[in-house]
Amino acid sequence: MQVKVVLNEDEMPRQWYNLAPDLPTPVPPPLGPDGKPISPDMLAPVFPMNLIEQEVSQERWIDIPEEVLALLYRWRPTPLHRAYALEKFLGTPAKIYYKNESVSPPGSHKPNTAVVQAWYNKQFGIEKLTTETGAGQWGSALSFAGALVGLEIKVYMVRISFDQKPFRKIMMETWGGKCIPSPSPYTKTGRKILKEQPDTPGSLGIAISEAIEEAVTDPSGKTRYSLGSVLNHVMLHQTIIGLEVKKQLEKIGEKKVDVVIGCAGGGSNFAGLAFPFMYDKINGAEIDIIPVEPASCPTMTRAPYVYDFGDTAEMTPLLPMHSLGHAFIPPPIHAGGLRYHGIAPLVSGAINDGLATPKALHQLECYEAAVTFARTEGIIVAPETSHAVAAAIQEAKKAKEEGKEKVILFNLSGHGLMDLTGYQKYFEGELQDYALPDEEMQKFLKVLDGLPKP
Amino acid sequence: MQVKVVLNEDEMPRQWYNLAPDLPTPVPPPLGPDGKPISPDMLAPVFPMNLIEQEVSQERWIDIPEEVLALLYRWRPTPLHRAYALEKFLGTPAKIYYKNESVSPPGSHKPNTAVVQAWYNKQFGIEKLTTETGAGQWGSALSFAGALVGLEIKVYMVRISFDQKPFRKIMMETWGGKCIPSPSPYTKTGRKILKEQPDTPGSLGIAISEAIEEAVTDPSGKTRYSLGSVLNHVMLHQTIIGLEVKKQLEKIGEKKVDVVIGCAGGGSNFAGLAFPFMYDKINGAEIDIIPVEPASCPTMTRAPYVYDFGDTAEMTPLLPMHSLGHAFIPPPIHAGGLRYHGIAPLVSGAINDGLATPKALHQLECYEAAVTFARTEGIIVAPETSHAVAAAIQEAKKAKEEGKEKVILFNLSGHGLMDLTGYQKYFEGELQDYALPDEEMQKFLKVLDGLPKP
């Protein structure tokens, strides 16, 4: 009885998989403020050219540099687990596998792109990266990456999270990252907002604006901005997850996966696991591929496919994606995670092409699934990851009803040890289910009026 | 360049190593309140007989049952890392390896014995385990074990920790464990203390007393008590750590280890790594084996070898060990971890026989080492583990001075993600070094007057 499958370092994939050239319908380009396609040069003040090349690449396979592999080896390859205890608890004939991304030092899949971005920036001569963080996961991962690669990291953390989650700041500082509450007095944007609304709790939109402003206005030209999801090169770096899984399944003779599941906020952990399986699907394999989102933030299942800004402050290019509008704010009864208004253009494209079938779940079902998982498999998952767990349990129950020995695979994108407050609220009955009402959604979508259509 | 060494499940050791029969000087037996040796039967109300058999065993190798292996596979074998980045930072010719026990779901080495104890209790027909917890690590590990094995877990948590560390309680509850502040109204001991001192912050001694009382007074006879360190069977279960390391070093052709280091509170993570190497030392190998403790709690380096109680309330048998006296209380300027007044009898015996050479370190040096480690190797270690890191850095610097290519190995016993407050205090300059003054120690040692001598 093999409980988990490990790989040696020399068995790790040597290339990332780029879905872009294989999508039946090419993803439209990002647009500038003038409505015209953005050229790579126009992104140069924000990102280093070597990452911009990956962003626009149409190569299917992209080599992972040896030095990057050595960085990834710190915690990769990650284990693939067979969920025997969960299967037994559910009495399902399905086999359930999960990829355990929680074993990275910051506790999630995010370092898979953080260390890579840090390395490419360093190669390009960059000395400092700025970024934003909401709950703190991305800021932690980039601070970790900065320590490994030797880059200065500055994280603008949404003020309300900064105040409520002091431990995330300590994590970042321990890795040498600088974490400051946003809005801050260090940027024009921050100063303006602080003057107008001194007591603002901040927002991810403001934090993004501050981080980009600091990067593009640094007179030395040695500062760039880093984004933890949504963009093509981020999805690319995360495909190491699914590529490892394929090798692991091959190692134990598991020939066919029937269902692939990942939770999706910006889309990167889902893409990381699923894109290598989409390659098989494009080439004729029958696989159900399911990105899962909360019913309170139904980007993939209900929002239109549009051109929208990546941030609230309208500083980013317009991206073609499913979006609830860049002014979207999820309700406070939601415990956090997966709150982004949009979703990666490549994931949107895959949905449009019928390669992925999104699903929205309510948070009480997700926490219930997470508790079941902790009490069977023993891992306390992140609130975001609980959506993937709940969908996997649904599929396993369906397989039981149908009497089918399906193979179900999901991404355990992170542990929940830094986010136990959500569990506490769940145990104390403080959480409620909430599906975004249609009239509410229509209000949020108004910000899209007048923007170009893909 | 191999960054870490992994093992497949089928490469995991199939037996634990018992140091007891190999110690040149046999460890004296535990004594009862009458000063006479405790017989196995006398421990039966507290522990199941199958674990008592391990506790008193003189067999060198003890088989790990197949079902226990399947439980350990959930997170084991754990990786052995080569600390290339730390070596480079230090400019040392030494090779530094560390065993990464932080990848277990509760984040430390403690589940290595928790799941084993839970399994043996279950086999014996036990339905419920009680235990105490200070900072919360052991209570978390046993709750995790209870979920995996299917046992009810009740954790008496020292009230001040219960109030200050609410996240530990949520962890335990997520795994289905019940965590209550001690003193509690559920035991005679608890009620008595609550009546006399309603505002007491509690103590580990009181919590142990409550946990044992609940176990031995359960009329069903289906409840037992579980201890996370100190005892022989706990050391035994932890030897899986060092036995794995030996296989890992063999796999990469590393023939000889010069220095083995572990931090030691009760002694279990140190013993787990070091005992298999003591076997080599007993058989002629030259190895420096170093258990590390805080200068504020200098059990191994300065306390006498005596018979002492394991708990403040004098409910346990008398154990032969180095001890500061069971009334010892470390000063509040110490950030936590490794505060136990005694040390495992087997570790004490090894020290007496010259197999291990303990060292005491100050906490500022330990936090400094931990921050260096986080910024080079990328892992934020537990405050306890920082002592092992600091000692490893000292040895690597010594090797540099001597120009020797030594092989240094230490145990990364746990991550610090649940204990970031210590790092915060360190960054804010709130921590001070403190070595227990001799006159203070003499005061604490007074409780030993009149007890038998080993």
Image (cartoon, coloured by chain):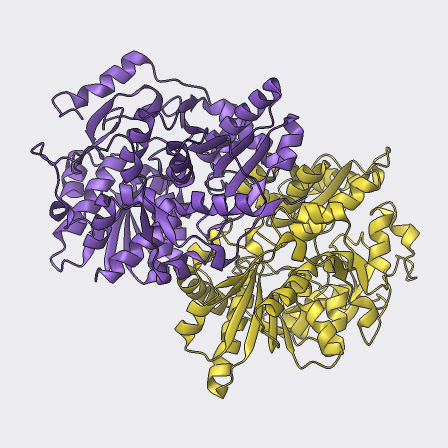
Chain colours: A yellow, B purple
Q: In this view, does A313 lie to the left or right of A174?
A: right
What is the x, y in percent for residue A209?
76, 47
**Quarter of the image with the C terminus of chain A in it:** bottom right
Q: Name the residue at 78% across, 67% down.
A: A19
Q: Is residue A359 above or below residue B255?
A: below
The residue sitting at the front extreme is: B284
**Quarter of the image with the N terminus of chain A in it:** bottom left
Q: Is residue B233 left or right of residue A154?
A: left
Q: Is residue A408 above or below residue B158?
A: below
Q: Is residue B344 visible?
A: no
Q: Can residue B390 be seen in this view?
A: yes
The residue sitting at the left extreme is: B34
What is the x, y in percent for residue B337?
39, 33
Q: Name the residue at 25% across, 15% down.
A: B442
The residue sitting at the top extreme is: B439
Asked which quadrant contains residue B310, the reply is top left
What is the x, y in percent for residue B149?
33, 61
Q: Is residue A425 left or right of residue B393?
A: left
What is the x, y in percent for residue B350?
32, 30
Asked which quadrant contains residue B55, the reply is top left
Given residues A85 and A300, the one toward you in this image is A85
Given residues B140 and B183, the one toward you in this image is B140
Q: Name the residue at 44% across, 66% down.
A: A368
Q: Name the residue at 67% across, 31% down.
A: B88
